[in-house]
Amino acid sequence: MVAEAGCRRHDLLDVAPEAWAALLATRPDLDGVPHLAGWARAGRPVILRRRGPGEAAAALPVGLPLPPGDGKRRIGFLLEPGSATPRPPVTLAAARRAVPDAWQPTCDALIALGAAHGIAPCVFGGLLWQALTGLPYLTGASDLDLLWPVTDAVDRRLLTALAEIEARAPMRLDGEIVLPDGFGLNWREIHAAEAGGPVLARSVERMDLRALVVGPDDRLVFARAGA
C-alpha cells in the first residue's frame, strides 16, 4: 500500500473499485460527470498532485483530468492511503504508440537524448492520459509534458539539447527535472536561470526556492535557501 512518505508529485496510483465507488458516494457534485463512475473499474489510475491549502495531511491528494471534449476539467480527490497502490511511471518510449504522427521525430530525438544521459523520460499531461485511457486528450494545441528524473547533478547539456529539440518541434516541450529528493524544477526555468539565481522547486507538500549552483563540467546543483 501507499505510504505518504514515499509519494511524489506525478506518481500514478490505482484505486480499488470498491474504494472508488465509496469515494464518489461522498461527492454528489460529481454525479453524471463523464467517465468517472467506471474509472477505477476500467483500470485507470489517478495521479498524485500538490496538496491544497487546508487539505488533510493524513490523506493522499490525487486528481485526474477530463478530456478536452468533456470540458478539460481537473478533478481533485483526497484518498485514504490504504485505498491505493502505486503504479510504475509511463516512459515516453512506452507511450509512443499514442503519439500523433507529427510528433514521432521529436519523440525519437527525446528518447535518444535521454539514453545519452542515462535517463528514461516519463510522460504526464495529455499524452499520459491518452496512452493510459485511450480517450482523446491530445489536441493540435497540446504540449508534450515530460519528467526527467536525475540521480545527481543536472548536466547543462541536457537542457541545451532540450531547447534545440523544441526549436524544431511541432509542439511545445514542457516538464520538469525531478531531483533525487522528489522536488521538480521546470526545465525551461533552469535553462534560463543564471548562476546563483533562484529556481522554484515543487513537491507534494510545498514549494521551495533553490539557488542554481554551477559545478565542474557545467553540472548544475540546486541548494536550498539558507543552506
Image (cartoon, rainbow, N blue to C red):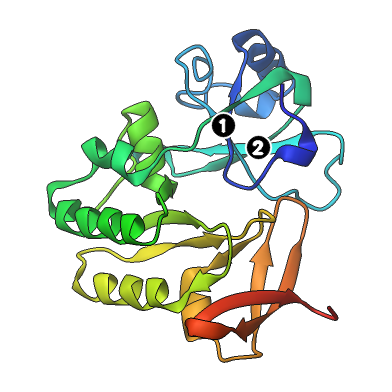
- Going by the numbered disc 1, the residue's amino acid type is Val
Q: Residue at the location (75% across, 21% down)?
A: 26
User: In screen coordinates, is 159 left or right of 60?
Assistant: left
Residue labelled with disc 1: 46
User: In screen coordinates, is 57 left or right of 104?
Assistant: right
Residue 103 position, x and y percent, is 19, 54
Residue 108 position, x and y percent, is 20, 53
Q: Quadrant of residue 174?
A: bottom left
Residue 99 position, x and y percent, is 23, 44
- Toward the front, the furthest residue is 216
Check residue 88 in the rendering and tell me which mark sits there, or answer none: none
Q: Of 90 and 17, which appears nearest the observer?
A: 90
- Going by the numbered disc 2, the residue's amino acid type is Val
Crowding around mark 2 (Cα neighbors within 10 Å: few <14, some 14 to 19, many 20+) is: many
Looking at the image, is 220 positioned above or below residue 24? Answer: below
Looking at the image, is 136 positioned above or below residue 15? Answer: below
Residue 133 position, x and y percent, is 37, 27
Q: Residue at the location (60% across, 11% down)?
A: 17
Choose the circle earlier in sequence order: 1 or 2.
1
Check residue 62 in the rendering and tell me which mark sits there, or answer none: 2
Q: Residue at the location (33% across, 34% down)?
A: 131
Marks 1 and 2 in Cβ contact (< 8 Å) = yes
Q: Quadrant of residue 60?
A: top right
